[in-house]
Amino acid sequence: MKKKLRVILYGNTIILAGIHLSLAANPSLEVQALDPSQGSEPDLLALRPDVIIFDTHSIQPEFHFNLIQRCSGLQLIGIDPDKAQVLVWSGQQLSELTSQELVEVIQKNR
């Protein structure tokens, strides 16, 4: 049996509530909501999420950069309701790359 992806909805907005209802119906996802006023960044990371979804208007800009740096492999999805956009960030930490390896990373992610 395939492992369920743990999705955390970080925030307390109507947009996230709707997304929560929609995603919770998917059996391949384990969906949980966390209100930022009741849980800090360490509390969020303690949940060991695979994906964090947040409303871009309710989170400080440095939020996603801090998380991506701390958690390799974490996927962050920001929802911008004003522009009807979904912004996706993913973290991957690489070290001591040769120039050729850097080119391969660039080409892979295009």
Image (tube, helix red, strand yellow):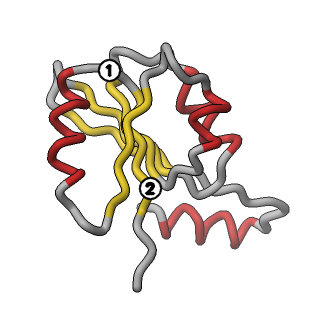
Which residue lies under the disc numbered 2? Answer: 6
Location of residue 91 in the rendering, given as x and y in whole percent from the top left corner: 58, 51
Residue depicted at x 44% and y 18%:
59
Location of residue 43 in the rendering, given as x and y in whole percent from the top left corner: 62, 32
Location of residue 42 in the rendering, given as x and y in whole percent from the top left corner: 67, 31
Q: Nearer the viewer, residue 102 or 57?
A: 57
Residue at the extreme bottom of the image, as rendered? 1
Name the disc covering residue 12, or none: 1
Above-or-below relation of 2 to 10: below
> Disc 1 or 2, which lies upstream in sequence?
2
Residue depicted at x 37% and y 31%:
54
Residue depicted at x 38% and y 43%:
32
Q: Amino acid at mark 2?
A: Arg
SS type, badge 2: strand
Residue depicted at x 23% and y 51%:
24
Residue at the extreme right of the image, as rendered? 96
Q: Is residue 106 left or right of residue 86?
A: right
Looking at the rendering, in which quadrant would you find the N terminus? bottom left
Looking at the rendering, in which quadrant would you find the C terminus? bottom left
